[in-house]
Amino acid sequence: MRSSLPCALIAAVLVTACSVDTIVNKVNPYKIDVRQGNYVDQAMVSQLKKGMTRDQVRFVLGSPLVVDVFRKDRWDYVYRFKPGKAEAEQRIISVYFVDDRLDHVEGDVAAGDAQGAAAAQQEHRSRVVDVPAVDSK
C-alpha cells in the first residue's frame, strides 16, 4: 500500500499539469480550410457598368447568395474564408438596381478600371514555356 501511494501522487500531479488544449492540439493538428459563398474579386467588379441588366450582372458575378424578398432591388454576394488555424476573412458586396438596371455597388471590393485589372490579372497568369523540338528520323 505504501509503494502505490507515491506512484498515485506522481500520476495525479502529472495529469493535472497537462492542459487539455495542449493535448487536443497534438491529437488533432490539421484543420481544413473552409470556403463559403460567392467569391468576387476586383477584376469581376471592374467589369460592372452602371445601367447593366440583372442578367448581365448575373453573368459577370454569378448568382447572388442572398436575394431579399422585401428588397428586390438589392443583391448580396457574401464570401467567407476560414483557414484551418487562422482568423476568418469575410467579404460582402451589395449590388443595387433601379428599374432593373444596375445603379451602384457597395461593399469590400470597389469598382475600378476594367482594362487595368484584366491586364494585371493576365500578367500574373502568363508564363512562357519552351518546348524542345523532337528529331524525327
Image: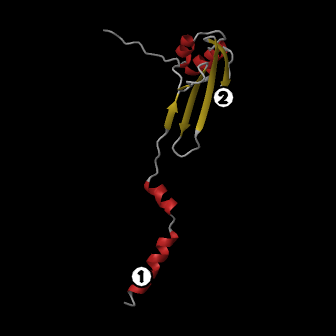
Q: Mark on residue 31? A: none
Given residues 70 and 106, the one toward you in this image is 70
> Which percent across, then down, holds residue 13?
49, 76
Position of the N terminus, as image quadrant, is: bottom left
Residue 108 circle label: 2
x and y, in percent, of residue 60 in the image: 55, 15
In the picture, the quarter occupied by the C terminus is top left
Could one spot residue 16 in this view of the protein? yes
Question: In this view of the protein, can residue 120 be seen by the observer?
Answer: no
Amino acid bearing label 2 = Asp
**What colour scheme does the image use?**
secondary structure
Q: Which residue corresponds to the image point at 38% horizontal and 85% vertical from the top-left? A: 4
Q: Which residue is mark 1?
A: 7
Tell me which residue sits at (51%, 20%) in the image: 63
**Is label 1 in a helix, a strand or a loop?**
helix
Mark toward the start of the polypeptide (1 vs 2): 1
Left or right of 117 on screen, residue 35: left
